[in-house]
């Protein structure tokens, strides 16, 4: 009885730590659980989630695998697929999300992940179809609308992209959705550029990506944006938005140079990565048409 009580106490302490994103605490408690009961698949799954939260993707994959050996389930396949995505194993991630849907066909998160994976692999038609399914299954989930909006942007369907970002923002403020809504609407002929100031007000001054809002509102320069980028991913994102800023001003050569740097620097799972690819492809088409 005491062993069972200790097991349950450690488990719920681990759940509490996960809830407040104390990932190291969660790993500690769930490790205690599996020592007491090595067949508790929930503990392996939850420890995997905590490891994923800390960026330890390879270790999380191991724990998800242990959970799946004990009890195959859609949520664990989906979670393992996310870790595989962050390690750049897109084919493995697609396989895991497909397995998740085989067990739970209406799992919106798996449909959304598959849409994203097809997106980064360049299959935009399939990505849009999959993301539309995800939106239909979870119409009140802003992530699903944002996901489809990014894909529509890459397709050059700027009005549809802006509409998806608008729906997402109506459900939850998210700075990148506001930025891509602006970039989409600004590309529509005859449309006035939307006001970014109201969205920038949601974000603490100086906090990334607030400096991007500053650039697009013409309150800073490209160099100031680069200076504000404190990490390598932020620097890569900065080059993407500098490229977009140049495009909106008709400076195609400068845009191309910035977007090339962004494409080389951005992790492939960043939404700006396929967007940079799409923009460069559109620029190449423009050059070819003019020659």
Image (cartoon, helix red, strand yellow):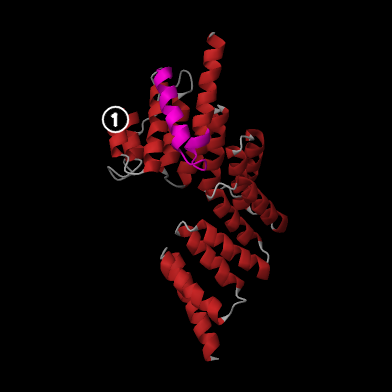
The residue tagged 1 is 223
Residue 100 place in picture, x, y as percent: 67, 56
Residue sitting at x 52%, y 81%? 8
Q: Position of 11 compared to 227: left or right?
A: right
Give the class, few, some or many, for how many residues have Cα within 10 Å of label 1's Cα (few <14, many ≥20). few
Residue 140 place in picture, x, y as percent: 54, 49
Residue sitting at x 62%, y 34%? 124
Secondary structure mostly seen in the magenta stretch: helix
The number of numbered discs placed on residues in the rendered structure image is: 1
- 256 is within the stretch colored magenta: yes
Q: Position of 4 compared to 226: left or right?
A: right
- Figure check: 222 above or below 207: above
Residue sitting at x 60%, y 75%? 40
The quarter holding residue 281 reads top right
- Residue 155 versus residue 286: which sits nearer the camera? 286
Q: Quadrant of the N terminus?
A: bottom right
Residues drawn in magenta: 251-274
Q: Is residue 183 visible?
A: yes
Q: Farthest top residue?
A: 291
- Figure check: 75 above or below 7: above
Q: Quadrant of the C terminus?
A: top right
Q: Farthest bottom residue?
A: 1
Residue 235 place in picture, x, y as percent: 37, 38
Q: Is residue 192 visible?
A: no
The quarter holding residue 192 reads top left
The quarter holding residue 243 reads top left
């Amino acid at each position: 009885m005491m062993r069972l009580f200790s097991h349950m106490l450690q488990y719920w302490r681990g759940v509490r730590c996960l809830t407040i994103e104390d990932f190291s605490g969660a790993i500690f408690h769930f490790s205690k659980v599996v020592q007491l009961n090595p067949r508790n698949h929930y503990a392996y799954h939850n420890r995997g989630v905590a490891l994923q939260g800390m960026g330890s993707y390879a270790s999380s994959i191991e724990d998800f695998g242990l959970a799946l050996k004990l009890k195959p389930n859609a949520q664990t396949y989906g979670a393992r697929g996310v870790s595989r995505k962050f390690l750049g194993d897109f084919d493995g991630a697609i396989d895991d999300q497909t397995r998740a849907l085989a067990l739970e066909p209406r799992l919106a998160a798996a449909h959304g992940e598959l849409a994203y994976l097809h997106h980064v692999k360049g299959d935009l038609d399939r990505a849009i179809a999959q993301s539309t399914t995800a939106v239909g299954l979870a119409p009140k989930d802003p992530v699903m609308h944002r996901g489809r909006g990014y894909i529509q942007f890459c397709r050059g369907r700027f009005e549809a992209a802006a509409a998806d970002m608008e729906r997402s923002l109506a459900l939850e403020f998210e700075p990148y959705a506001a930025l891509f809504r602006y970039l989409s609407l600004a590309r529509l002929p005859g449309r006035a550029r939307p006001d970014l100031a109201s969205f920038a007000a949601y974000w603490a001054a100086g906090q990334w990506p607030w400096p991007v809002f500053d650039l697009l509102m013409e309150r800073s320069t490209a160099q100031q944006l680069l200076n504000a980028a404190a990490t390598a991913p932020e620097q890569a994102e900065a080059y993407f938005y500098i490229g977009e800023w140049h495009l909106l001003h008709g400076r195609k050569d400068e845009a191309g140079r910035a977007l090339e740097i962004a494409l080389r620097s951005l992790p492939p799972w960043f939404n700006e990565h396929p967007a940079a690819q799409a923009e460069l492809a559109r620029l190449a088409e423009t050059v070819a048409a003019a020659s």
